[in-house]
Image (spheres, grey):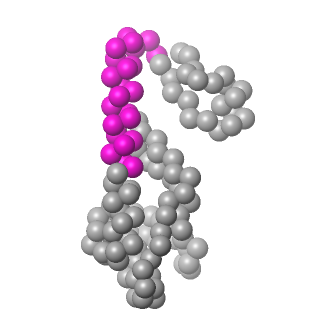
Amino acid sequence: MRYLGETFSEMITHHATVRFITGKRKEESMAGEKHRQDDEAAIQRRLDEWTMLLRDKNIEGVMSLYAPEVVTFDIVPPLRYVGADALRKLWEEVFFVYQGPIDYELHELFITVGDDVAFSHSLNG
């Protein structure tokens, strides 16, 4: 097993994402890298679309991103929201309070893609 791009100590110091190659042929790893890049780009597009839906106060579009069992955290009490219904209520309140346009951006977005799962995290505002 070898690290791509950084030594192990650099990974620990900089909290870098490191991929492992475990003896796959070069063609397989290159195809896997292309697939990962395509998945990351698709997730980026989906998040960009979602941001526009939020700015437009489109509640159905905003909620389309969330699974029914979503758990999310916010700065607004109760701080933790469990389930799509609770999150929908929060977004409806936000849309009601902000009568004008909503300026919303994703900052420091990190997308991680695996073989069968992906996740992202960012600072939003």
Would residue 3 be found to the left or right of residue 97 on screen? right
Q: Is residue 52 in view? A: yes
Image position, residue 37 (x, y; %) = 38, 35
| Relative image position of residue 91 (x, y in whole percent) | 40, 77
Prevalent SS, magenta region: helix
Q: In the image, is residue 86 above or below residue 22? A: below
Q: Residue at x 46, y 16 (%)?
A: 22
Question: Where on the picture, by quarter, is residue 12?
Answer: top right
In the picture, measured across the screen, residue 122 lies left or right of residue 55, that is: right
44 w.r.t. 74: above or below: above
> Residue 78 at what x, y percent from top left?
54, 78
Reply yes or no: does residue 42 show up in magenta: yes
Number of labels in the image equals 0
Residue 90 appears in the rendering: no
Whether 34 is drawn above or below 22: the answer is below
Q: Residue at x 33, y 31 (%)?
A: 35
Q: Is residue 8 left or right of residue 62?
A: right
Please give the name of the residue rendered at 63% of the width and 24% of the height, measured from the top-left corner: 6
Nearer-the-camera pick, 94 or 52 = 52
Residue 30 counted in the magenta span? yes
Of the 4 image quadrants, the one containing the C terminus is bottom right
* Range shown magenta: 22-44
The structure residue drawn at horizontal position 55% and vertical position 22%, both measured from the top left corner, is: 4
- Give whichever of 36, 88 is nearer the camera: 36
Q: Is residue 109 left or right of residue 87?
A: right
